[in-house]
């Protein structure tokens, strides 16, 4: 059993030593035979010395190799033990393979979940050096796809990546559906995460060269994409899946109605030539439908809603008009257009005006 587990290096060492010893024995015989024959003692002694030197060097080399193997095995065992420890130190560098060009110019107004704004469009363009067009063959046969991306506009992203020691994980985050009450981070889809990676699903409208036209997106313009996978209904749709009660409370984020001022469409039509060539939409009328779908949900932040409600409560105690404290103008930026609107106390949205966005 011992011989069956002996390494090739050990066998080589044994053979080397045996051959060397045999050589010394043979040389000794030659030496004594030569001594009797011609008395050439110095020459024979020189041969023996050389053989002894060779033997010592061979033994030294084998010992060094053996120590090297032992150290390598010890390092391997140490690495394996470290990988099982509680401290995770391994990093996995990733680079975006594509960029999203979305109708949503800023985070404000971007849907909180996918598919709730069906007309929300985006074009995912891949880096040709990383993703050849052939990689997209067959994707057009799927109705939807998963998109893995980076929350690149997180306010704490610089601290998280550039100075991790200053970035502290918030265990709880404010939830819009709970009117600002807090919930455990991993029970939400908050973008403020220890690893700022997002997952969303979108409808595949078409595949064109090295790009994909998507709809129903909840992605802001400029979003870096890490990967795309096809949506598989038989395993991605889970029958009988359950969620907490507060997730089902859609009425907290919906509005009663969305109406436009009388001259809104005319103003939008006047602005249209400035964005027509780069727009993801075919006409001002279609773009107006997009605005209505977006504003059908209350896109205001928790702090914005809370502040208005507090002001209204204070005003109601002093005045008869309940909408007096809601005289706030909000902005929605879509494809470089600035849309202004108001929300009444009964959650009725009035879209008042549209203009070219001021980038200064």
Image (spheres, grey):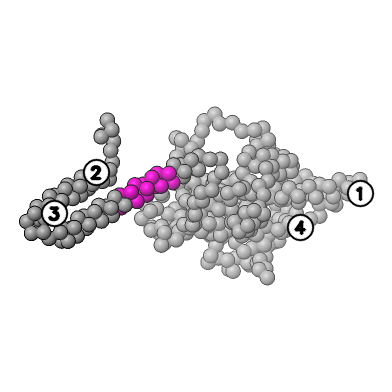
Q: Which residue position is annotated with label 3?
A: 31
Residue farthest to the top, as pictured: 240
Comes first in the chain, label 1 or label 4: 1
Q: Residue at x 47, y 51 (%)?
A: 227
Q: Are marks 1 and 4 in contact (CB under 8 Å)?
A: no
For the C terminus, which image quadrant?
bottom right
Which residue shows up at 51% across the image and 59% down it? 99
Answer yes or no: is residue 215 visible: no
- What is the C-alpha distance between the residues marked 1 and 2? 103 Å
Q: Quadrant of residue 47?
A: bottom left
- Magenta span contains residue 350: no
Q: Which residue is mark 4?
A: 329
> What segment carries the magenta color?
61-76
- Residue behind mark 1: 319
99 with respect to 300 (left or right): left
Mark 2 is surrounded, within 10 Å at the Cα level, by few (under 14), some (14 to 19) or many (20 or more) other residues, namely few
Q: Residue at x 65, y 42 (%)?
A: 185
Q: Position of residue 48 (x, y in %)?
A: 19, 55
Residues packed near mark 3 inside 10 Å, few (<14), some (14 to 19) or many (20 plus): many
Judging from the image, what secondary structure is the residue with disc 2 in? helix
């Amino acid at each position: 059993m011992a011989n069956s587990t002996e390494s090739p290096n050990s066998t080589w060492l044994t053979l080397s030593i045996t051959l060397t010893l045999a050589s010394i024995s043979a040389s000794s015989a030659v030496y004594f035979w030569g001594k009797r024959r011609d008395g050439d003692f110095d020459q024979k002694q020189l041969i023996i010395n050389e053989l002894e030197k060779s033997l010592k060097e061979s033994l030294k080399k084998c010992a060094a190799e053996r120590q090297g193997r032992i150290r390598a095995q010890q390092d391997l065992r140490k690495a394996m033990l470290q990988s099982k420890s509680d401290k995770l130190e391994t990093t996995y560098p990733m680079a975006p393979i594509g960029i999203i060009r979305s109708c949503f110019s800023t985070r404000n107004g971007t849907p909180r979940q996918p598919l709730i704004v069906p007309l929300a469009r985006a074009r995912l363009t891949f880096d040709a050096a990383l993703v050849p067009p052939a990689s997209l063959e067959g994707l057009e046969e799927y109705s939807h796809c998963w998109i893995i991306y980076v929350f690149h506009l997180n306010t704490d992203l610089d601290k998280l990546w550039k100075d991790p020691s200053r970035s502290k994980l918030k265990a709880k985050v404010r939830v819009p559906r709970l009117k600002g009450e807090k919930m455990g981070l991993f029970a939400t889809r908050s973008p403020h995460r220890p690893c700022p990676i997002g997952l969303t699903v979108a409808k595949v409208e078409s595949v064109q060269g090295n790009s994909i036209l998507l709809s129903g997106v909840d992605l802001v313009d400029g979003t870096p994409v890490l990967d795309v996978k096809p949506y598989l209904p038989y395993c991605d749709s889970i029958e009988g899946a359950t969620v907490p009660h507060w997730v089902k409370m859609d009425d907290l984020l919906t509005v009663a109605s969305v109406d436009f001022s009388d001259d809104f469409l005319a103003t939008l039509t006047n602005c249209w030539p400035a964005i027509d060539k780069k727009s993801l939409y075919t006409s001002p009328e279609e773009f107006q439908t997009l605005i209505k779908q977006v504003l059908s949900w209350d896109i205001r932040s928790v702090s914005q809603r809370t502040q208005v409600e507090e002001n209204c409560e204070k005003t109601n105690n002093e005045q008869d008009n309940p909408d007096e404290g809601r005289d706030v103008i909000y902005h929605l930026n879509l494809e470089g257009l600035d849309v202004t609107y108001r929300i009444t106390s009964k959650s009725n949205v009035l879209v008042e005006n549209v203009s070219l966005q001021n980038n200064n």
